[in-house]
Amino acid sequence: MNPAWVVRTARLVLCPVGGGDLADLRAIKADPSVFAMMLGGVRDPVRTAEDLAHDVVAWGRFGFGIWTIRESGRFVGLTGLEHRTDGRGVALRFALWPEAQGRGLAREAAFAALRFGHERANLPSVIAVARDTNFGSRMVLGAIGMREAGVFQQAGHTMLLYESLA
């Protein structure tokens, strides 16, 4: 892992995902209260291992990817940047355990990931997608300066597209 990819904020450490994170990733991605609204939904252990392998390769290939979020050394969630499979662009993603929500950690981590994308990965545009009913994610995206840029339907849900330009 490239140490330049580690991001520190006032309360958090974001580290690129690696093999040692598999147990934490399996737990959070299997939890419907956290991952049901994510693209692809809840993951089984095999799919999570495949995701991790993809994420590790992405860091080497693109110089950006998915980070674990740790607060005082404890895994509280994940955030990152990845190419959407639907071709809409490089998307900001984040998911935190329920007990880590409501304290501004998602906003802090997502903003750090967005800044990394623009300033260090030189991405001219970063998008994010949230269900119209996911007010928590929508509040985070607005708070970090992303603007609504479109609407589309996906699997029977109205999705809002957000964008941030460098």
Image (cartoon, rainbow, N blue to C red):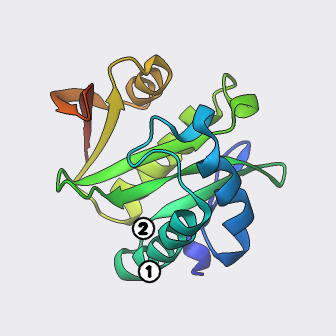
Q: Position of residue 78 (x, y in %)?
A: 59, 51
- Above or below — where is 135 with respect to 60? above
| Numbered disc 1: secondary structure | helix
Q: In this picture, is 36 found above or below 76?
A: above
Q: Position of residue 115 (x, y in %)?
A: 43, 50
The numbered mark at residue 144 is: none
- Closer to us: 3 or 100: 100
State the residue at coordinates (56%, 68%).
46
Question: Which residue is rendered at x = 21% and y = 54% of the image?
Answer: 89
Instruction: Report the Cα–Cα distance between label 1 and label 2.
Output: 10 Å
- Label 1 crowd bin: few (<14), some (14–19), many (20+), radius 10 Å: some
Can you identify the residue that label 2 sits on? 64
Which label lies toward us, 1 or 2? Answer: 1
Residue position marked by numbered label 1 in the rendering: 57
Q: Quadrant of residue 57?
A: bottom left
Of label 1 and label 2, which has the lower sequence position? 1
Identified by mark 1, the residue type is Val
Residue found 61% across the figure and 32% down from its top: 33
Q: Amino acid at mark 2?
A: Phe
**Residue 164: image x %, image y %?**
27, 40
Classify 79 as above or below 134.
below
Determine whether, in the image, residue 116 is placed left or right of residue 73.
left
Q: Secondary structure at mark 2?
A: loop
Hey, which quadrant is residue 24 in on the image? bottom right
Residue 160 lies left or right of residue 40; in this view the side is left
